Image: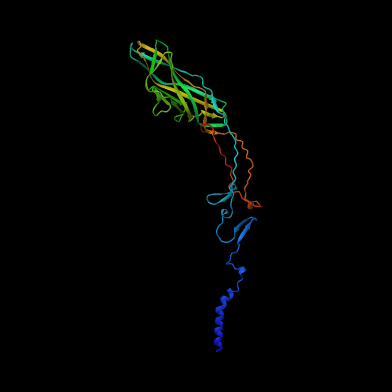
């Protein structure tokens, strides 16, 4: 009987044991209650010390607008300080004096076996006039040229004089052409030009360097037919032209005439007329160039002061620079490309 009572007592004691331990907890060490887990860094930056989630600067500090600490779209932070230094670089313009006049005289033979009142023809075959721009003291800042923008008007001129018989007028027939090309050019359209609005001549279809007469053009004795041509660009320089060596510029152009000339009725025999072709060219300026330039650039970079650093980065903090760079920005203030 005593043995049975002892067992009952033991079971009772076991049943009360959970209550016994709970009632003995010291509240000052209870980890289920609020405990300040803040960690202080550098004396003035406090961050939470619990948990395993990643913290970013955005969550733990309020950056001023002028702070050099910046964030990007991915939430990365870095010291960011930019400064500018401006240096003006000028390249001397290339001014070239007009070439001397170089007229070409070609004899046209009007032959008839008998006197006639009909027009008599003579052929103009590859009659070539040339003009050459040359300058030997061009700035050496320009190393080579691919193209040059220009803005000048040259006049192509045609006139005649006679060597025998009296001829008052000759006519250059519709389809008469004048081609302008760089001497020795191997690529098309070395000269880019345009013509004024005229019903008498225009650019030949498919041949951008050739002027073609739309109508017959008369030239009377003592008069000159002038065709104004407005040049816009020179490009695709052949070897030996453009900047062909430091400080030296050359531009040599051929003007080639082809077509049919006529004169009114003549007596029997041979009548000769001298056709005179020439160009009136002004001084020119290379307004802007595309090519290689090598100007002298003197850049003095002032010391860069970094301000607005958060206080916690000021006390004996070593920062690693990652990907520092200097950005060089060049701007061309000329009318075209340089």
Quadrant of the snapshot with the N terminus = bottom right
| Residue at 56 percent of width and 78 percent of height | 16
Q: Position of residue 247 (x, y in %)?
A: 57, 28
Q: Nearer the viewer, residue 11 or 172?
A: 11
Q: Is residue 338 above or below residue 273?
A: below
Q: Is residue 322 left or right of residue 235?
A: right
Q: Is residue 151 above or below residue 44?
A: above
Image quadrant of residue 85?
top right
Q: Nearer the viewer, residue 197 or 236?
A: 197
Spot the residue most to the right.
316
Q: Position of residue 302 (x, y in %)?
A: 63, 40
Spot the residue most to the bottom.
1
How is colour applied across the structure in the image?
A: rainbow
| Residue at 42 percent of width and 25 percent of height | 210
Q: Is residue 275 above or below residue 323?
A: above
Residue 143 appears in the picture as rendered: yes
Image quadrant of residue 90?
top right
Residue 212 appears in the picture as rendered: no
Q: Position of residue 180 (x, y in %)?
A: 44, 25
Q: Is residue 64 left or right of residue 181?
A: right
Q: Position of residue 66 (x, y in %)?
A: 59, 46
Q: Is residue 120 above or below residue 44?
A: above
Q: Nearer the viewer, residue 59 or 298?
A: 59
The image shows a total of numbered marks equal to: 0
Image quadrant of residue 276?
top left
């Amino acid at each position: 009987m005593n043995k049975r009572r002892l067992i009952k007592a033991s079971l009772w004691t076991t049943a009360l044991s959970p209550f016994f331990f709970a009632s003995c907890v010291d509240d000052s060490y209870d980890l289920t209650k609020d405990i300040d887990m803040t960690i202080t860094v550098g004396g003035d930056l406090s961050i939470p010390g619990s948990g395993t989630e990643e913290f970013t600067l955005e969550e733990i500090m309020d950056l001023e607008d002028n702070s050099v600490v910046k964030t990007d779209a991915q939430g990365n932070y870095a010291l960011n300080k930019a400064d500018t230094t401006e240096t003006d670089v000028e390249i001397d313009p290339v001014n070239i004096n007009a070439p001397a006049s170089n007229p070409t005289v070609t004899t046209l033979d009007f032959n008839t076996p008998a006197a006639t009142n009909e027009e008599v023809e003579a052929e103009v075959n590859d009659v070539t006039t040339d003009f050459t721009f040359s300058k030997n003291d061009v700035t050496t800042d320009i190393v080579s040229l691919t193209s040059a923008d220009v803005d000048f008007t040259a006049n192509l001129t045609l006139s005649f004089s006679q060597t025998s018989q009296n001829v008052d007028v000759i006519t250059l027939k519709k389809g008469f052409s004048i081609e302008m090309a760089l001497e020795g050019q191997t690529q098309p359209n070395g000269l880019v030009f345009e013509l004024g609005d005229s019903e008498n001549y225009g650019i030949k279809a498919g041949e951008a360097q050739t002027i073609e007469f739309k109508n017959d053009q008369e030239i009377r004795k003592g008069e000159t037919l002038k065709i104004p041509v407005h040049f816009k660009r020179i490009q695709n320089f052949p070897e030996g032209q453009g900047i062909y060596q430091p400080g030296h510029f050359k531009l040599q152009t051929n003007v080639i005439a082809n077509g049919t000339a006529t004169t009114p009725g003549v007596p029997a025999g041979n009548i000769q007329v001298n056709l005179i072709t020439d160009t009136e060219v002004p001084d020119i300026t290379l307004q802007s160039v595309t090519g290689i330039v090598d100007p002298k650039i003197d850049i003095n970079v002032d010391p860069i002061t970094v301000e607005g650093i958060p206080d916690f980065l000021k006390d004996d903090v070593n920062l690693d620079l990652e990907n520092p760079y200097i950005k060089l920005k060049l701007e061309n203030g000329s009318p075209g490309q340089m």
